[in-house]
Amino acid sequence: MTDPGTGIDVENVTAWLVDNIVDTVAPFDFEIIAGGRSNLTFTVTDGRGERFVLRRPPTGAVLATAHDMAREHRIISAVGRTDVPVPPALGLCTDVAVTGAPFYVMGHVDGVVLDSSERAAPLSLEVRRAAGEHLIDVLADLHAVDIDAIGLGDLARRDGYVERQVKRWTTQWERSKTRELPAIDEVAVRLAQRIPPQVGVSIAHGDYRFGNCLVDTATGRVNAVLDWELCTLGDPLADVGYLGVYWADPGEEQHRPNDPTGIDGFPTYDELLERYARRTGRDLSQIGYYRAFSAWRLAVISEGVYARFRHGAMGDQEVDPAMLDAFKTGTVRLAEDALDALRRLT
């Protein structure tokens, strides 16, 4: 029986792993390492001490399309054939009878998720700079991937990415908002009025930041890019702008507490932009638009999470009042940041 607390039917999953993952030995230990609002991720240790990772949708009421395991498995399998570092894809189970939902298995990759300044504090100044530079280099490499050559050319529509996203998240705001926020509405109108020409089509990760990467803390190199559930085809500058929403230059206040930047050693965001432009040849003169778009999109997402918790749609998850308030106030701050970025555009 699937444990509702973890989402794992140990007996069934054990049998599936033995039959489908090469060189694994029962019994298996399942340790959850990420859960809640996103997909559930487990470190799985087999009888010989070998580790790999299992990923499945949340156990609460969620839209299946938002947590498509087969799609995510397809993406990392394809990207794994390039120079972009991702965990190796080991297997996919689409039989919901096994543990109540599809899941996939990938290789375990060493590294640290730098999701706070505290996590980055032990790194030397040189390693922090190297980490920031490699983070933007990996993004440039991702955006250079030939989507047809790796079999992802039909993953999504190639054109009109930002236009479609603005329409989508405007609709989502109307469905999920818990209060009126004029800044959200004003940003939506301004974004729709000045959509820049799409600079090309690439794999767009959708949530690219330190918090979704495993970093070697000795060298600063990104060992693996994680969490591909929002990945699609689209305008590569959307990822660059999104990274800017999280990035704080050394000495600046960090508005996103789940990011390590803002402490000494990391490059500035402008330095990242210069490095990306040199590597890709892309014109970043309108990056302020993409930063505004990304902050606004994240504001709508934050409001949606706040609304679901408030209305009890996240299953039996315990609601931390401080976390709930962070989502509520975060929506306002992100909307104001987006509006400020648009006002500064020339």
Image: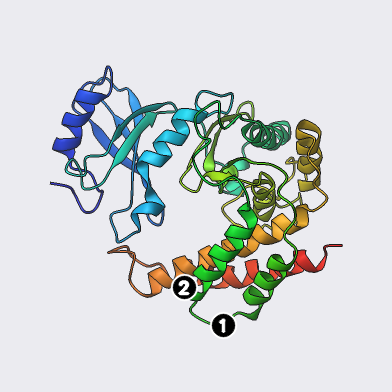
Whether residue 54 is situated above or below residue 235 in the rendered picture = above
Mark 2 neighbour class, 10 Å CA radius: few under 14, some 14 to 19, many 20 or more = some
| Element type at mark 2 | helix
Is 317 situated left or right of 72 in this image?
left
Q: SS class of the residue under badge 1?
A: loop
Query: Looking at this view, is 193 or 330 the one in front?
Result: 193
158 or 247, nearer to the observer: 158
Q: Which residue is more in the foreground, 113 or 97? A: 97
Which residue is pictured at 71% across the width and 49% down the height? 198
Residue at the image point whose x is 67% and y is 57% from the top: 254
In the image, which disc is placed on residue 176? Answer: 2
Left or right of 109? Residue 50 is left
Residue 187 spot, x, y in % from top left = 68, 71
Q: How many residues crowd mark 1 within 10 Å: few (<14), some (14–19), many (20+)?
A: few
What residue do we see at 81% from left, 33% from top? 278
- Reply above or below: 215 against 157: above
Q: Position of residue 74 (x, y in %)?
A: 42, 34
Q: Amino acid at mark 1?
A: Glu
Number of numbered discs visible in the structure rendering: 2
The reply to whether residue 331 is visible in this rendering is yes
Which residue in the structure is indicated by mark 1? 180
| In the depicted structure, whether residue 256 falls above or below residue 109 | below
Alpha carbon of mark 2 to alpha carbon of mark 1: how far?
11 Å
* Amino acid of disc 2: Ser
Q: Closest to the observer: 263 or 207?
A: 207
Residue 233 location (% of width, % of height): 57, 43
Where does the C terminus fall, quadrant-wise?
A: bottom right
